[in-house]
Amino acid sequence: MRAGWLVSSGVAVLVLSGQARAECILPEPAPVVPDGATASDSEMHAARDSIQKFVNSLQDYQVCLEAEVKSAPPDTRLELKLAWRTLGNAAIDQAQALAADYAQQLAIYKGRTGAAPPHK
């Protein structure tokens, strides 16, 4: 996945720089999207909840990194600020890709079962 590679390479930049901020923690691992052709109601429901939680965590991570960019001391290297922004953008790309993958599998699930997964 492209976004995952960007996040990994960006982390390497930050680790090597020695200036990564501890407050911004990338959530891992990403939840697995079940196969809509074979998943049960409970698997689809559990996936929806875990994916939503993970997407929210990725959004929080991006917000945190953007705050780091904006509040960085004036002597912070431009490359580091760009790395933070790249990491944040990659997190949002990952969130969007995961949500799209789930939506695709949900459509397959609904086509197979004729129903959405049960709600809590």
Image (cartoon, helix red, strand yellow):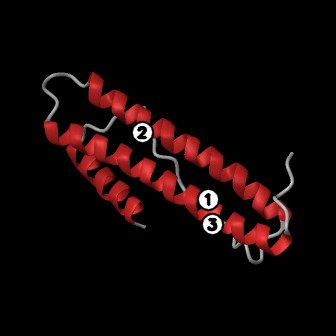
Residue at numbered disc 3 = 104
> Is the C-beta separation of discs 1 and 2 under 8 Å?
no
> Is the C-beta separation of discs 3 and 1 under 8 Å?
no
The residues bearing labels 3 and 1 have C-alpha atoms spaced at a distance of 15 Å
Q: Residues within 10 Å of mark 3 (few under 14, many from 20)?
A: some
Q: Residues within 10 Å of mark 2 (few under 14, many from 20)?
A: many
**How many discs appear?**
3
Label 3 vs label 1, nearer the camera: 3
Residue in the image at 33% along x and 58% along y: 6
Q: Between residues 72 and 110, which one lies in front from this camera angle? A: 110
Q: Residue 109 carries which label?
A: none
Q: Examine the rendered structure and indicate whether residue 101 appears above or below residue 120.
A: below
Q: Examine the rendered structure and indicate whether residue 20 appears above or below residue 41.
A: above
Q: Examine the rendered structure and indicate whether residue 50 appears above or below residue 102.
A: above
Which corner quadrant of the image does residue 3 belong to?
A: bottom left
Residue at numbered disc 1 = 31
Residue at numbered disc 2 = 62
Three-letter code, disc 3: Gln
Q: Examine the rendered structure and indicate whether residue 40 appears above or below residue 16.
A: below
Specify the quadrant that holds the N terminus.
bottom left
Image position of 30 (left or right of 77) = right
* Of pointers 3 and 2, the one earlier in the residue sequence: 2
Residue 108 visible at all: yes
